Amino acid sequence: MNTLTHKKRCAVVRCLVDGCSILAATRITGVAKNYAHAFIRDIQKRLINRVQLTTDGN
């Protein structure tokens, strides 16, 4: 699987945080829609793990 540079991944996240839809973010950044979906799922898993670690008190 091809990976994107850190700069491209940040651009996708920036668009989504600014309120763009996934389709708009892919058009703006030039990233494939399937990659954006996979990237969002990966971010979601990481954030859930981080929240669980911080709320468990460990």
Image (tube, helix red, strand yellow):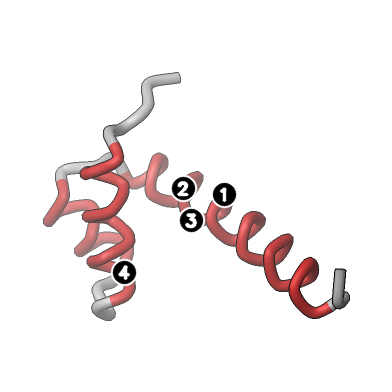
Residue type for callout 3: Ile
Residue type for callout 1: Asp
Q: Which mark is residue 31?
A: none
Disc 4 residue crowd, few under 14, some 14–19, many 20+, Cα 10 Å: some
How much space separates mark 4 and mark 3, taking CA atoms? Answer: 10 Å
Where 23 sits versus 4, above or below? below
How much space separates mark 3 and mark 1, taking CA atoms? Answer: 5 Å
Q: Which mark is residue 39?
A: 2
How much space separates mark 1 and mark 2, taking CA atoms? Answer: 5 Å
SS state under label 4: helix
How much space separates mark 1 and mark 4, taking CA atoms? Answer: 14 Å
Residue type for callout 2: Phe
First reached walking from the N terminus: tag 1 or tag 4: 4
Disc 2 residue crowd, few under 14, some 14–19, many 20+, Cα 10 Å: some
In percent of the image, x 29 and y 71: which residue is there?
Answer: 21
Q: Nearer the viewer, residue 34 or 19?
A: 19
Disc 3 residue crowd, few under 14, some 14–19, many 20+, Cα 10 Å: some
Asked if disc 4 and disc 3 are in contact, CB closer than 8 Å, the reply is yes
Please give the residue where the numbered disc 3 appears in the rendered image.
40
How much space separates mark 3 and mark 2, taking CA atoms? Answer: 4 Å
Quadrant for the N terminus in the image:
top left
